[in-house]
Amino acid sequence: MYQMTAEYVGNLRTTGKHLKSGNTIVTDPPVDNNGKGEAYSPTDLVAASLCSCMMTIMGIVAKRDDIPLTSLTATIEKIMSAEPPRKIAKIKIDFTYPNPEVLTAKQAEILKRAAHTCPVALSLHPDIVQETTFNF
């Protein structure tokens, strides 16, 4: 059974729809790759997916272990390879927890370990450097 659909709508733009929820996404290539940069590029979505997956797994563990996690934020940087073929070389994610003093050292370590077990992290090619910083 299909879970998502996608359509090429022209001018290098695509749309995607999640069938169960009806939510949609739009992609557009970056300016340095013939696009307008007006939406997430497909490789941006890979980087964003890694971050969202890590946050989700941390959230599952936080809920299970009663660890406060609300207001965790992240910044994401995607670095493309300098040499052909064009591909993601590195994804840098910096997580920040606004109240780190509420976490014990053990809780912080549990969250960090959990993040690195997310399915997206484990699915990415090993040549893609995943650089993660935890500011908590």
Image (cartoon, rainbow, N blue to C red):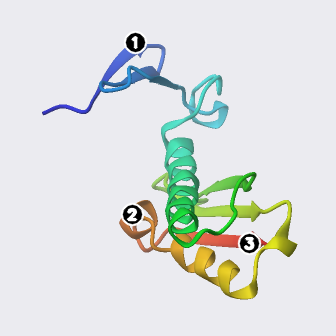
**Which three-letter amino acid code belongs to the residue tagged 3?**
Phe
Q: Residue at x 57, y 35 (%)?
A: 33
- Picture coordinates of residue 61, whole percent (x, y): 52, 68
Mark 1 burial class by Cα count in 10 Å: few <14, some 14-19, many 20+? few
Q: Nearer the viewer, residue 29 or 27?
A: 27
Residue 4, located in which quarter of the rendered image?
top left
For the view shown, which residue lies furthest in the left direction?
1
Q: Residue at x 69, y 53 (%)?
A: 76
Mark 2 burial class by Cα count in 10 Å: few <14, some 14-19, many 20+? some
Kind of element beneath mark 3: strand
Q: Residue at x 18, y 31 (%)?
A: 2
Can you identify the residue that label 1 sits on? 9
- Picture coordinates of residue 38, whole percent (x, y): 65, 22
Instruction: Indicate whether 114 appears above or below 86.
Output: below
Mark with earlier residue (3, 1): 1
Q: Quadrant of the C terminus?
A: bottom right
* Horizontal side, residue 16 vs residue 93: left or right: left
Can you identify the residue that label 3 sits on? 134
Q: Nearer the viewer, residue 45 or 33?
A: 45
For the view shown, which residue lies furthest in the front direction?
66
Can you identify the residue that label 2 sits on? 119
**Which three-letter amino acid code belongs to the residue tagged 2?**
Pro
Q: Residue at x 12, y 33 (%)?
A: 1
The mark closer to the camera, 3 or 1, is 3
The mark closer to the camera, 2 or 1, is 2
Mark with earlier residue (3, 2): 2
